[in-house]
């Protein structure tokens, strides 16, 4: 959920853009981290682990820990907690270590 | 090749103060940060800072970041590169960076590393579930991006970060079910504890998290009490209905680049992990490489600012710049001692003693 | 207990108070600041010079009650939100407490709120007398509430009814 009013902070309006998550169109603010846009849409599960297929979300939210890796526009292992949202981005849950389009699974 | 006199890696409070102090001396500075903005963790700190007027006491962290950033932008001697990740520091001192997807090289005479620290994790069943987040992460999402990660939070850790982020969660309209800490006492400033406790948030010391509950994401948590030997007391299990578990269990200095420089390191628990061995003016065992802020040992933003000033001054002085350096150096060193002289500075003073040995 | 958890008890606060005569004379400030931390905005913000100068920045702040006039600048200036101003002269049965408030929505003047003690327990109701949110307070707003006189050392927080 998004914070609408805050006793100290102001959140200036940003441009709302559409993007695709797992084949569904959702919206977010241009330039915010993809993780923020997904959470604003109530999406918490960002990927599944390689061996036991356990659900995974973010942890550090500043690009240090690698928990939030997702596939963005076909590229795997994108740290979506720091990657800025752009219009029409295609975001997918990464399964395990990810693979490049046309390439072997790593 | 980009040439500069002093390269500063990290644009948080330490890096920004180092840049300003060195630039005031007349040195040419290149200040770099991997984020799209300067400010480090200051940009998420909505609370008012302590310390003295010199460290902007009473001012909110977010405003301190703006004050420092404005001063930097207006200084002719400081070049700023944001969205710039330092990739490596080589044996000959060369620094390689990625700036907006382009690979570049920097040759600097002196380097100040102010890369901060990152959140620790603790082990408990289901600690990998979505919903288990670092407290700093929740703070980033909430205060920088205006998104709340959940509705009901269990905060693990009653140090300053746990207490402050709990208060900020309440300010954002989120319910904090409890703050727990394995230690018998509250580790953070008591005033931070008081202002959250009076809002009805219980602070349970000698409690730990036993497990997180949930299948796809956190739905609850089980906490239990610890005895005076830190063992779980049977029969004290309590289940809390929460959708977010924030871990505020300490920070670890981000020392990767120091290892590139082959600085001698030492494990100092009081500082959060491995830190570089350095002299009193924060120069490491690799000549010309200085450290400032949480990377030198996890502490406070006020100390980070003073350490930044000291390293900026000393790095500039070593290049031959000397505008009133001696009294300034004495003043900054005295400020640091003063900040660390109270009871709450005990941990830091212990850590410093271990460094000397 | 305080040494471990920071939970302040009334006896600690009572030790810092001025005489009963002074208390019933004019409004006065209370600093519920009992841990030595490096901090001095109470001293730098007080225009009356009523905060005794610190020898060391970690010292606990002390108030000169002759100089303190209860102006409440400290209530908004303290980063720890540890300053309160009491007016025991408000009426025969009630006293007022000025406390810092950094939440939304604001309480409404004239309405009742739930009065909370230092542990967040409900201890009764209080009536909101004044809500001050000047820009110079930098979002640490000052709320004045009226409580029964015997609760001046107990009430330290408030909750809006229905929240």
Image (spheres, coloured by chain):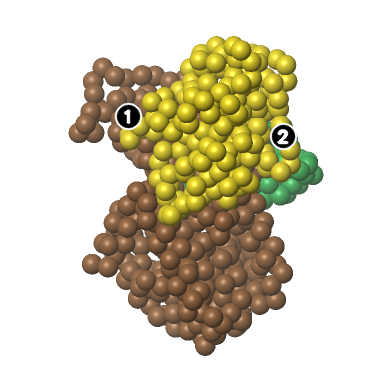
Chain colours: A green, B brown, C yellow
Per the image, label 1 sits on a secondary structure element best described as loop
Q: Quadrant of the C terminus of chain B?
A: bottom left
Vertical side of A39 occupied by A74: above or below: below
- The quadrant holding residue B322 is bottom right
Vertical side of B27 occupied by B83: above or below: above
What residue lies at 56% left-to-right and 66% top-to-bottom? B17
Q: Earlier in the sequence, mark 2 or mark 1?
A: 1
Vertical side of B317 occupied by B267: above or below: above
Q: Nearer the viewer, residue B197 or A89?
A: B197
Q: Which mark is residue C133?
A: 2
Q: Which mark is residue A59?
A: none
Image mark 1: chain = C
Can residue A105 be seen here? The reply is no
Q: Which mark is residue C1?
A: 1
Where's residue B213, x and y in %? 42, 24
Q: Are marks 2 and 1 on the same chain?
A: yes
Where's residue B123, x and y in %? 34, 38
Per the image, label 2 sits on a secondary structure element best described as loop
Structural crowding at the residue carrying mark 2, measured as other residues with C-alpha within 10 Å and reported as few (<14), some (14–19) or many (≥20): some
Q: Residue furthest left?
A: B229
- Classify residue A90 as left or right of residue B113: right
Vertical side of A44 occupied by C45: above or below: below
What residue lies at 47% left-to-right and 42% top-to-bottom? C62
Where's residue B347, x and y in %? 32, 52
Structural crowding at the residue carrying mark 1, measured as other residues with C-alpha within 10 Å and reported as few (<14), some (14–19) or many (≥20): few
What residue lies at 42% left-to-right and 48% top-to-bottom? C59
What residue lies at 47% left-to-right and 34% top-to-bottom? C32
Can residue B329 be seen here? The reply is yes
Q: Nearer the viewer, residue C124 or A11?
A: C124
């Amino acid at each position: 959920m998004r914070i609408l009013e805050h006793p100290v902070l102001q959140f200036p309006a940003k441009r709302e853009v559409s993007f695709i998550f797992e084949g569904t169109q959702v919206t977010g603010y241009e330039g915010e981290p993809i993780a923020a846009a997904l959470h604003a849409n109530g999406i918490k599960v960002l990927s599944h682990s390689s061996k036991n297929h356990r659900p995974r979300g973010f942890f550090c939210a500043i690009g240090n820990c690698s928990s939030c890796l997702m596939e963005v526009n076909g590229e795997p292992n994108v740290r979506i907690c720091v990657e800025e949202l752009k219009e029409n981005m295609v975001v997918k849950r990464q399964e395990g270590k990810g693979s490049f389009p046309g390439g072997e699974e790593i | 090749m980009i040439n500069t006199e002093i390269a500063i890696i990290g644009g948080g409070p330490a890096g920004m103060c180092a840049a300003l102090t060195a630039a005031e001396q007349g040195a040419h500075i290149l200040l770099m940060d991997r984020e799209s903005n300067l400010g480090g963790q200051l940009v998420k700190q909505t609370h008012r800072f302590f310390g003295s007027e010199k460290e902007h006491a009473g001012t909110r962290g977010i405003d301190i970041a703006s004050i420092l950033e404005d001063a930097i932008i207006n200084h002719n001697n400081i070049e700023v590169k944001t969205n710039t990740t330092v990739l490596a520091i080589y044996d000959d001192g060369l620094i390689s960076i990625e700036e907006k997807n382009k690979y570049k090289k920097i040759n600097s005479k002196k380097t100040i590393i102010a890369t901060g620290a990152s959140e620790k994790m603790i082990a408990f069943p289901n600690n990998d579930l979505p919903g288990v987040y670092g407290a700093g992460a929740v703070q980033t999402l909430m205060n920088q991006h205006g998104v709340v990660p959940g509705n009901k939070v269990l905060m693990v850790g009653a140090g300053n970060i746990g207490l402050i982020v709990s208060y900020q969660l309440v300010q954002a309209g989120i319910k904090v079910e409890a703050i727990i800490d394995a230690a018998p006492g509250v580790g953070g400033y008591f005033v931070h504890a008081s202002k959250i406790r009076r809002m009805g948030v219980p602070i349970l010391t000698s409690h730990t998290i036993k497990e997180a509950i949930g299948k796809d994401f956190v739905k609850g948590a089980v906490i239990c009490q610890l005895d005076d030997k830190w063992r779980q007391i049977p029969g004290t299990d309590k289940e809390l209905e929460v959708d977010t578990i924030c871990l505020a269990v300490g920070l670890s200095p981000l020392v990767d680049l120091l290892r590139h420089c082959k600085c001698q390191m030492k494990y100092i628990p009081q500082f959060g992990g491995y830190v570089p061995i350095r002299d009193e003016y924060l120069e490491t065992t690799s000549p010309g490489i200085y450290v400032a802020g949480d990377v030198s040992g996890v502490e406070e933003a006020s100390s980070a600012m003073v350490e930044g000033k000291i390293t900026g001054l000393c790095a500039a002085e070593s290049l031959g710049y000397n505008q009133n350096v001696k009294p300034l150096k004495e003043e900054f060193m005295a400020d640091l001692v003063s900040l660390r002289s109270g009871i709450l500075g005990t941990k830091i003073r212990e850590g410093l003693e271990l460094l000397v040995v | 207990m305080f040494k471990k958890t920071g939970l302040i008890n009334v006896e600690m606060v009572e030790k810092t108070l001025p005489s009963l005569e002074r208390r019933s004379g004019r409004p006065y400030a209370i600093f519920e600041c009992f841990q030595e931390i490096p901090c001095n905005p109470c001293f730098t913000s007080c225009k009356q010079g009523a905060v005794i100068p610190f020898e060391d920045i970690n010292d606990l702040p002390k108030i000169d009650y002759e100089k303190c006039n209860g102006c409440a600048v400290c209530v908004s200036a303290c980063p720890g939100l540890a300053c309160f101003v009491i007016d025991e002269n408000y009426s025969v049965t009630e006293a007022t407490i000025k406390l810092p408030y950094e939440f939304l929505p604001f309480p409404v003047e004239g309405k009742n709120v739930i009065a909370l003690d230092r542990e967040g327990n409900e201890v009764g109701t209080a009536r909101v007398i004044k809500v001050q949110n000047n820009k110079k307070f930098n979002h640490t707003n000052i709320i004045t509430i009226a409580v029964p006189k015997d609760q001046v050392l107990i009430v330290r927080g408030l909750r809006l009814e229905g929240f």
